[in-house]
Amino acid sequence: MGLMNMPVFSALTDKMRWHQTRQGLLAENVANAETPGYRGRDLAQYDFADRQAGFSSAAVTTTATQPMHFSVSSSEGGAFGAQRMANFEITPEGNGITLEDEMMKVTTNLMDYQAATSLYQKSIKILRTAMGKQA
């Protein structure tokens, strides 16, 4: 079995490609921050649920064994769910690019990319150890 046939590696590869593409779009936004009428672009959030078909379909649920235990149920709603905020600020040039916001997106994208590559490298090390090969 090839490494890319494993669902975790193909999902991580897709995630890293998504981050690379997003970095290019964010760089265009920064480069055009003073271009009159320019509207920034961004990618739709990467969703691992699209890649879920390759993973195991086993389900894990929690059960309250004592009446004093609290329930950890996903049906309670998204009290901490992320909400997307639209950028309503329009600069004097007539575009919606705010350099501070774009640089925060760039930094977040970089950290997420580094986390994905670290997970990829650690997964390869685990496989090498399991096969009995020393790093």
Image (tube, grey):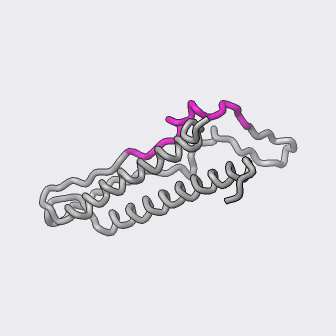
Using the rendered view, name the quadrant where residue 29 is placed.
bottom left
Q: Residue furthest bottom?
A: 100
Nearer to the camera, 72 or 58? 58
Using the rendered view, name the quadrant where residue 122 is placed.
bottom right
Nearer to the camera, 22 or 131? 131
- The residue at the point 58 percent across, 38 percent down is 2
Rendered view: 22 above or below 14: below
Q: Position of residue 28 (x, y in %)?
A: 25, 58
- The residue at the point 57 percent across, 50 percent down is 79
- The residue at the point 67 percent across, 59 percent down is 135
Q: Position of residue 17 (x, y in %)?
A: 42, 48
Per the rendered image, the range of residues in magenta is: 44-60
Q: Is residue 114 magenta?
A: no
Rendered view: 124 above or below 101: above
Q: Position of residue 31 (x, y in %)?
A: 22, 63
Using the rendered view, name the quadrant where residue 76 is placed.
top right
For the N terminus, the image quarter is top right
Q: Residue furthest right?
A: 66
Q: Position of residue 133 (x, y in %)?
A: 71, 53
Specify whether 35 is left or right of 83: left
